[in-house]
Amino acid sequence: MNTTQRVRRAGLATVAALVIGGSGVAIGAAATDSSASGTPAAATATATPGPATPGPASYASVVRQVLPSVVLIRTENGLGSGVVLDTKGNIVTNAHVAGDATKFQVQVAGDTAPRSAKLVGTYPPDDLAVIRADDPSGLQPATFGDSGKVQAGDVVLAIGNPLGLSGSVTQGIISATDRAVTEPATDGSPAATLPGAIQTSAPINPGNSGGALVSASGQVVGIPTLAAGSPQGGGQAQGIGFAIPSNLARDIAAQIIDTGHVTNSHRAAIGAEVATVLGPDGTAGGVGVVAVTSGGGAERAGLRAGDVITAVAGAQTTDTTALSQALAAAKPGDKVTVTVSRDGQDRNVQVTLGELPGS
């Protein structure tokens, strides 16, 4: 994969979670809460607004703090970025940066030469991977913040290696939290769904993937992973990028480091292999159940191959993307009402959602 492919593009209104795992294809959604935690104080009619508090004239001190924790990652097929997790040389990055590679070259801004690294593990459903530098000396672990506390309007910096320009920094704000976006498949990396993504106006360019989205205090709150595609095609939409919340990234990375794979996906799954069903006019007309997972929520609720799911929790599901949207806020163990069409008749069933298998 070349440098121009390192940042994926997301449709502005797409949400999909068709993820291969376990015994079939499961529809799932991340359960991590990335929503803003604070609420603004209520204004009163007699309040006199004071002068706006200016931001700092420079973020140089923040950049100096974070830069030694962000590495350039090279593979045979392209490049990206990564964030140092610990003194053992573990580095978190995107699964699409790692791709099919097992060996890497990593380099901190200012290094005279790259150092070799090996793959620890990867989890494509969350587009996360961990690699480990053979020589961890001089690699400075990043300070991670609580992504559950970020809110729209917070100033952030994106630090990475766009287009191979080592140690580059862009600045913006948190535009929104808890976005559901879908990354398209690329060579060596399947499509991935990020239901709890952080949206930022900080420019995210090819090579930024896997780097650091940093608060004004120097804490990593996200892992930049993709930029939105223009609705008209022809490139990225300006000022719309997305990052994986740091809380999720640290959790998944810790599981990979501890066991070599993911044991708790935090994602809800309906427990069925599904496909979009086309109507007589060729338009999407529902989500067909191809097979149910043994012991899964769909099977326990009585769903079977041939059923067509037309709604979940009252939301119409004309295709697999719509089904993913309906499940985006769900957690393993939640009970949802699923409307299915069978033999020309509609019926409602209660499905207890399971958990999407790990890696």
Image (spheres, grey):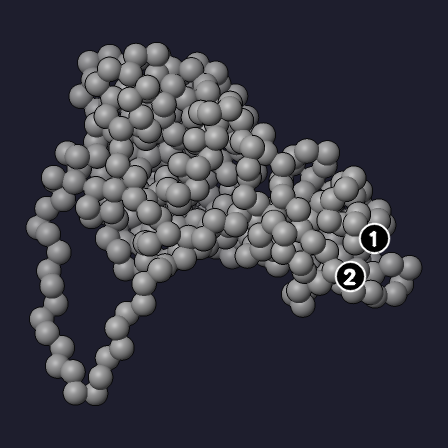
> Quick one: label 2, few (<14), some, or many (20+) residues within 10 Å?
some
Side of 89 relative to 300 (left or right): left
Res 267 → quadrant: top right
Determine which residue is flagged by label 1.
Answer: 302
* Nearer-the-camera pick, 271 or 54: 271
- Type of residue at label 2? Val
Residue 101: image location, x then y, percent: 48, 18
Measure the alpha-carbon separation of dots 1 and 2.
Answer: 8 Å
- Type of residue at label 1? Gly
Task: Kindly indicate whether the residue at mark 2 contacts the one at mark 1 (C-beta within 8 angstroms).
Answer: yes
Q: Residue at x 83, y 61 (%)?
A: 341
Determine which residue is flagged by label 2.
Answer: 349
Quarter of the image that includes the C terminus: top right
* Nearer-the-camera pick, 350 or 194: 350
Residue 67: image location, x then y, percent: 21, 31
Q: Residue at x 26, y 73 (%)?
A: 41
Side of 64 relative to 179 (left or right): left
Residue 36: image location, x then y, percent: 36, 59
